[in-house]
Amino acid sequence: MPLPAFCQNEIGMELMRRARAEPDEPFHRMVLADWLERLADDDALEMCRVLRASFEGHEIIPLEPEVAGRLAPMIGARRGWFSGSWLGRGEELEQLWLASACTEELPDGVPLEMEYIPAGTFMMGSPESQEERSDDEKLHPVTISKPFYLGKYPVTQAQMRAVMGVNPSQSKGDNLPVEQVSWDDCQEFLKKLNQNAKNVTFRLPTEAEWEYACRAGSTSAYGYGNNPDSLGDYAWYEDNSGNTTHQVGQKKPNAWGLYDMHGNVWEWCNDWYGDYATGAISDPTGPQKGSRRVYRGGGWSGPAGFCRSADRGGVIPGNRYSNLGFRVSAGPS
């Protein structure tokens, strides 16, 4: 199923987000059902019946990603419908994106799950007092001015095979993260993925987007806090990996629902590697040129310090390693 059209379904998507966020609260589902009913569309009316059944029958039916995916294309842009109404947030709602998980269906029915990442400002890098810190982690304020989607997991071998027809990984398994992929290989994957994409462009995240999503509002060394002794709850790294990759999604997610942001495989970012810009900056994309591309996140073969949110490195874009994979991001075309 395709991703929903970005920036076109703000009001309905906000209602859907509320329905998903509070599955035991039927009021949100009733409002969403009323919204869908106004579309006078057969598919929308079918979804109304599903939604109403979830509370009229006293049985809550969670809006899982596949249901959300069915809802998304049914809700067209209806700007101004809620202006001055009981909601009282018409203008604000029209600025919102779909704040909900969604799924892109790849060939052979393989799902690619994405999580919504809100816009915001954060401190990128690390304080000089942080243990294991490197000199290239200069602390500075960064604004991510637009929300975007980021893969819930690193790209898996099943997803790579569905899109490219090959699996270059050293350790084999459909739900293992793909590795042995160069930055250039990632671009070929994205090029093919975008051939069938509608209203959205898939790409690698920028380095700033990656760290922002990894932190998920945190300011600590790791997304969950500062204690490396707790890293094993969130990451596969040298102390617990057994010198190999592991199936994605087996450890705890961060606050924004992203798995394996620490450990398992390092992840390519779009930027050339280089020094950070001086001072506050919005939507940085890294140096204009360079010899190495950024990788982030730590991996199964590295120590805890390499899994810190601010840790960074660079490698020649044509190189491939058994501990290096990638995660896709998406934004409006």
Image: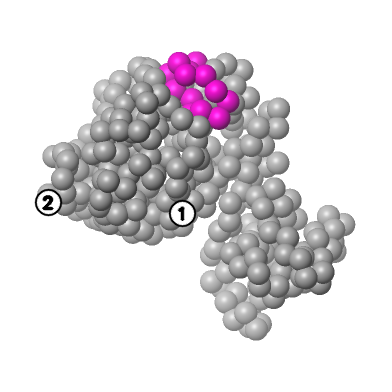
Q: Position of residue 216 (x, y in %)?
A: 39, 54
Q: Is residue 291 one of those drawn in magenta?
A: no
Q: Is residue 175 one of those drawn in magenta?
A: yes
Identify the residue under disc 1.
256
Cα distance between the residues tagged 1 and 2? 27 Å
* Image position of 71 (left or right of 111): right
Quadrant placement of the N terminus: top right
Q: Is residue 317 visible?
A: yes
* Image position of 140 (left or right of 2): left
How would you rate the neighbour count of disc 2 (Cα within 10 Å): few for under 14, some for 14-19, many for 20 or more?
A: few
Q: Position of residue 237 (x, y in %)?
A: 33, 33
Quadrant placement of the C terminus: top right
As drawn, 322 above or below 282: above
Specify the label residue 129 is tagged with: 2
Q: Which residue does the image show at 26% across and 45% down from the upper left?
A: 228
Q: Position of residue 198 (x, y in %)?
A: 65, 41
Q: Which residues are magenta?
A: 168-182
